Image: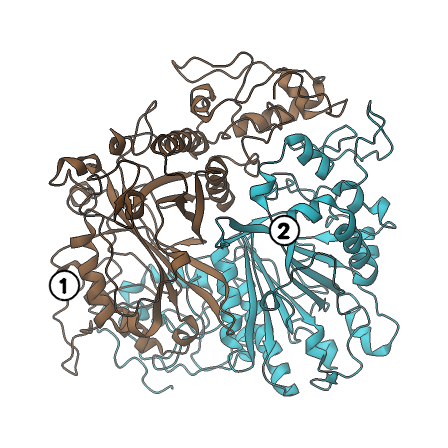
Chain colours: A brown, B cyan
């Protein structure tokens, strides 16, 4: 693989000529590894491509590095505001101001070897650190790689910046046990909160949109960056993990920061007005961040969270033939401003007691706003981070469109299941206009630091 | 539907209060229609929402207007650079600098009534004019509409600008005849160039991704704008047309202007370097714009074009295990710079004669660059306007991802079929890494002017 890999390259004026450029400085304090090996940032590559014509082909011997080595060898990217660091006490992509686009994938781990799984998580950690920083996952070959091996980055994001990419990892119950038997030596490590979700009335879950051993949420402002990230994680996982399901979301339906405008879902209504925000530190502690649990075996989840994913098909064609009066009544808010029907503006607190001339509550008893509100759910809140989706048509003349709900909660037993059970039974919106076609619940471990790997506490 | 539609509205401080704001000025020279009826631009609505709290609810009697009336009643939007006019000699969305996102849908017309089809095209014309200008397709109800009727715009783009939306319409062969019988009195009007595409070797076309009576290409820089546009055309078409297939494209794979950077496809290579550009007026006349044909019945296509749509699944997992040498050899270009393997930079003309040390051409005989190049195809060119797509997973552990090819050509008999037949038989890239799963060919009529409707020449 090393040797003289450029033998078959075009003879003149090639971009590989830029390989003669000096090494990009290595990360602060981390030694650059591999003699003559360089790992260019995607942005660095662009810069070099511009001067590529000046160099002749240099036969640099470049070996394939394991992915563990990539993070340390990578150049620090210039931060133009597009970089959200991967490493930290908590995983990014939860309270991060919601990016515009989503690509989420659930993987099934196909190896049963504990060491292989740990190596996969290490490799994914290194790749996630690189991609969120706007770097490639390895030698692309385009500039710095061997010629007779597959590129270590697929390349479609080469000209793009980091795009505020975040990659958030979670573990499904099936990673811990299958058919009643523990996997990967993880007996006793499955957190009690990582339940098997009950069947909710009206659920129409499709097996190939449900479950999965490991989920990865890729959010970015550029969809090509998010797709590139999932695709390269899948590439790195060849032989160890396979894509079980994947979902693109084209538009965010939640704000997770007060600096963001509330977006609209495909019902045409503002969504997530009451969402928890990054600024609500105390509420996040109370409703989003998981504790250490009650058993030693689940203490690794302290500082993590639980991710609920629900693919919710909307019957938009029926909705679109529904009067504004009924639409607003079902939601409990006005369509334009998003104000509660009890009056005020978008962020006015709803008054569930106030009644209209007909003696009925202005915010109906079976409106979504009432049924979903913390006041009606023992005070529980969630951090929602969902996306609008459109996946072609359903073969029956309709768009296959809806909401891909993502929610982060402290404990799904208290913070998701009771509310969803209420919704599924009483919410006219859910009963008549929604169909849940996919589902997943994942334990999202806390973050990790340079030198660690995602989920390491689980294997400690 | 009129009368006092706001009887059930919240009593105070509602955004409907903004209905008391003065009428937005009407379009230059066009009289505002409907007493008290206003059609707010989406941006106008936003502005009003900001002062909504100041007004009390005004019980404005607002009737439902037919969609024909909307365009004339609509306010002219402020142009912040996001508006590409719908009306013109040619349809927008062909030489328009390619926007970042796509939502394309093919509709089957379910009525057999000629007048109903014409009315549908008139309604779609009015809606397209409104949406491309950043306006709603009618009363949203949110501010200006009746309360006991469905909103005339679904609302999810209310807070967004026009997003450089273009809507491009085309007619499939099945609009003209079905089972050998003419439809809609269109006997003799099907252009000779609107052939039934032949079966190409390796085609694996899925019926529910293929064909259709009418296609609409929605391109925009914001995917929510493109999705909103298709969804509202589907809404307007209720009872007359149904969605046959729909395709989201998340990232453009072509430039159609010299001002644009060449994007990358999911092979990680720059795509469309040699694409025809808006600046190539003479080449566009020769290769993209249709003439009047040879029969009077097809003269309505003069100034139009033919749209080829091909959903091309890429076997990216196999590609990702292919060496850089083979990848570049198959494409005929370098991966980083996109230069032809004969040397130079991205836009250097390929030299198909130059050979390497081994005596073989540097640009291989079966490379995609060679086989697709005009020099190898009797000089024909096309204007490509395709998009990367990812539609979840295939149920076999892989992403369902690839290229949604869109090409505009003067005549598919000379400008598409021969080249695609060559590709399907000889191009190793096509043979080993691509699978065509959807297909469509559509006659794209010339543009229309205010007061006309799209495709009117067909019905003259």
Foreground residue among A413 and B52: A413
Give residue B220's position: percent from left, percent from top. 55, 55
Q: Position of residue B53 (x, y in %)?
A: 27, 63
Rendered-image quadrant of the N terminus of chain B: bottom left
> Is residue A318 placed above or below A77 in the rendered structure?
below
Q: Quadrant of the C terminus of chain B?
A: bottom right
Q: Residue at x 21, y 64 (%)?
A: A421
Disc 1 secondary structure class: helix
Q: Give whichever of A69, B416 is nearer the camera.
A: A69
| Above or below for B4 versus A230 | below
Q: What's the chain of the residue with tag 1?
A: A
User: To which chain does the residue with label 2 belong?
Assistant: B
Q: Is residue B318 left or right of residue A455?
A: right
Q: Position of residue A60 (x, y in %)?
A: 63, 15
Disc 1 crowd rating (10 Å Cα; few below 14, some 14-19, many 20+) is some
The x and y percentages for residue B333 are: 72, 35
Q: Which mark is residue A344?
A: none
Q: Is the Cβ of the residue at disc 2 closer than 8 Å to that at disc 1?
A: no
Tell me if residue A308 can be seen. Answer: yes
Q: Residue under circle 2?
A: B98
Q: Residue at x 72, y 63 (%)?
A: B90
Q: Nearer the viewer, mark 2 or mark 1?
A: 1
Which residue is under mark 1?
Answer: A376
A253 left or right of B41 in image: left
Q: Is residue B68 left or right of residue A378?
A: right
Q: CA distance from mark 2 to mark 1?
A: 48 Å
Q: Residue at x 27, y 38 (%)?
A: A445
């Amino acid at each position: 693989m090393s040797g003289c890999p450029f033998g078959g390259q075009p003879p003149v004026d090639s971009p590989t000529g830029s390989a003669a450029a000096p090494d990009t400085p290595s990360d602060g304090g981390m030694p650059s590894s591999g003699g003559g090996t360089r790992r260019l940032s995607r942005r660095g590559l662009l810069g070099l491509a511009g001067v590529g014509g000046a160099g002749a082909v240099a036969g640099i011997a470049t070996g394939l590095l394991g992915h563990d080595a990539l993070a340390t060898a990578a150049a620090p990217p210039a931060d133009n505001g597009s970089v959200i660091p991967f490493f930290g006490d908590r995983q990014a992509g939860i309270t991060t101001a919601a990016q515009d686009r989503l690509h989420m994938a659930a993987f099934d781990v196909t190896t049963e070897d504990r060491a292989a799984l740990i190596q996969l998580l290490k490799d994914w950690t290194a790749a996630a650190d690189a991609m969120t920083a706007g770097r490639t996952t390895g030698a692309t070959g385009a500039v710095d790689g061997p010629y007779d091996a597959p590129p270590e980055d697929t390349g479609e994001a080469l000209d793009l910046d980091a795009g505020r990419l975040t990659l958030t990892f979670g573990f499904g119950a099936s990673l811990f046990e299958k058919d009643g038997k523990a996997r990967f030596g993880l007996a006793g490590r499955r957190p009690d909160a990582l339940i098997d979700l009950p069947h909710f009335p009206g659920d129409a879950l499709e097996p190939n949109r449900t479950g999965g051993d490991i989920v990865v949420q890729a959010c970015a402002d550029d969809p090509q960056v998010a797709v590139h990230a999932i695709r390269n994680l899948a590439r790195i996982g060849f032989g160890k993990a396979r894509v079980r399901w994947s979902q693109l979301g084209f538009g965010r339906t939640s704000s997770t920061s007060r600096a963001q405008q509330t977006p609209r879902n495909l019902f045409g209504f503002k969504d997530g007005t009451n969402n928890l925000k990054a600024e609500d530190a105390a509420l996040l502690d109370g409703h989003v961040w998981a504790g250490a649990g009650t058993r030693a075996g689940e203490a690794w989840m302290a500082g993590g969270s639980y991710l609920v994913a629900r693919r919710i098909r909307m019957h938009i064609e029926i909705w679109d033939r529904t009067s504004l009066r009924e639409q607003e009544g079902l939601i409990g808010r006005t369509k334009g401003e998003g104000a509660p029907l009890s009056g005020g503006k978008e962020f006015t607190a709803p008054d569930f007691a106030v009644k209209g001339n007909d003696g009925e509550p202005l915010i109906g008893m079976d409106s979504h706003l009432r049924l979903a509100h913390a006041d009606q759910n023992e005070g529980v809140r969630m951090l929602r981070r969902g996306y609008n989706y459109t996946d072609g048509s359903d073969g029956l003349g309709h768009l296959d469109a809806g909401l891909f709900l993502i929610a982060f909660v402290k404990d799904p037993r208290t913070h998701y299941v009771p509310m969803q059970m209420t919704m599924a039974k009483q919410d006219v919106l859910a009963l008549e206009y929604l169909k849940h076609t996919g589902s997943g619940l994942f334990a999202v471990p806390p973050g990790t630091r340079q030198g660690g790997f995602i989920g390491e506490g689980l294997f400690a």
